[in-house]
């Protein structure tokens, strides 16, 4: 079965850095996706890691350790618009994603 | 990146009626699409994998006779909620992509279904 764990909520101030951890146990693993979802909207793609290591994309970076079943999403220079739910989603080779419950990030002034 | 269009954005229907939701890949061909459901304040739950030209594969606990999926072309998958009831009220979202890549899998804009 699938087991994906990530914190329920994190609060940080504007300009700060926040790291969202995710651990997973899945079958047929073929990469780890991170999505951002604002309330009432569809998720938008942030990052994809298939190899171990850190992928940097502007203010957002994502890390993967396949052997540990662990990933994190790093949000730097937080802005108010970054307040959203962040979803960790391991995927298989066919594109089927299983989503964690999501981490609600609250950015305060 | 891939563009996925979903229609309608929202729909209100009476209990007992059926509702069809369309998911289209606009700039690529999608042999596989995925349908998710999301209840308020919960994460996305995969309902089924839609396969072009063949039967959909449903996740455990999802009634295939209630949630009919048709993927008749490489750019269109439809989800029909049959005999809808208030407990089917939810946010339904499809996704598709050209494969795992830096663009990921793209989601449609979602359909908010309310059954009254």
Image (cartoon, coloured by chain):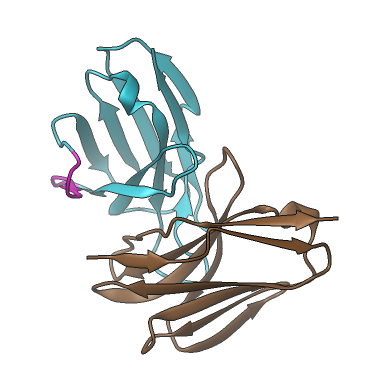
Chain colours: A brown, B cyan
Q: Nearer the viewer, residue B57 or B28?
A: B57
Q: Which quadrant of the figure has residue B92? A: top left
Q: Taking A71 as reference, is A5 above or below it?
A: above
- At horizontal 20% and vertical 32% (from top left) the residue drawn is B68
The x and y percentages for residue B91 are: 43, 35
Q: Which quadrant of the figure has residue A97? A: bottom left
- At horizontal 53% and vertical 60% (from top left) the residue drawn is A35
Q: Which quadrant of the figure has residue A55? A: bottom right
The number of discs equals 0
Q: Taking A102 as reference, is A28 above or below it?
A: below
**Would residue A64 be counted in the magenta stretch?**
no
Q: Taking A2 as reference, is B94 above or below it?
A: above
In the picture, measured across the screen, residue A5 lies left or right of residue A12, that is left
Q: Residue furthest right?
A: A109
The x and y percentages for residue B43 are: 43, 49
In the picture, measured across the screen, residue B66 lies left or right of residue A80, that is left
- At horizontal 34% and vertical 10% (from top left) the residue drawn is B14
Quadrant where the C terminus of chain B is found in the figure: top left
Q: Taking B87 as reference, is A80 above or below it?
A: below
Most prominent secondary structure in the magenta stretch?
Answer: loop
The x and y percentages for residue B42 are: 44, 45
Q: Nearer the viewer, residue B27 or A77?
A: A77
- At horizontal 61% and vertical 46% (from top left) the residue drawn is A38
The x and y percentages for residue B36 are: 36, 45
Q: Nearer the viewer, residue A75 or B52?
A: A75
The part of the chain drawn in magenta is: B53-62
Quadrant where the N terminus of chain B is found in the figure: bottom right
């Amino acid at each position: 079965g699938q087991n994906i764990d990530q914190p329920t909520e994190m609060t940080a101030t504007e300009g700060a850095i926040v790291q969202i951890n995710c651990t997973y146990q899945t079958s047929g693993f073929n990469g780890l996706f991170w999505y951002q979802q604002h309330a009432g909207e569809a998720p938008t793609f942030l990052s994809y890691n298939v190899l171990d290591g850190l992928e940097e994309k502007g203010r957002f970076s994502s890390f993967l350790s396949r052997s540990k079943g662990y990933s994190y999403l790093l949000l730097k220079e937080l802005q108010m618009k970054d307040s959203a739910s962040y979803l960790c989603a391991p995927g298989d080779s066919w594109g089927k994603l299983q989503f964690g419950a999501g981490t609600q990030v609250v950015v305060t002034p | 990146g891939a563009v996925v269009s979903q229609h309608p954005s929202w729909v209100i229907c009476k209990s007992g009626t059926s509702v069809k939701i369309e998911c289209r890949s606009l700039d690529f061909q999608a042999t596989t699409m995925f349908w998710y459901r999301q209840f308020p304040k919960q994460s996305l739950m995969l309902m089924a994998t839609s396969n072009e030209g063949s039967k959909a594969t449903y996740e455990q606990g999802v009634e295939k006779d209630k949630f009919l999926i048709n993927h008749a072309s490489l750019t269109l998958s439809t989800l029909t909620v049959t005999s809808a009831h208030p407990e089917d009220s939810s946010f339904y979202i499809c996704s598709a992509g050209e494969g795992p890549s830096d663009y990921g899998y793209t989601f449609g804009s979602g359909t908010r279904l309310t059954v009254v």
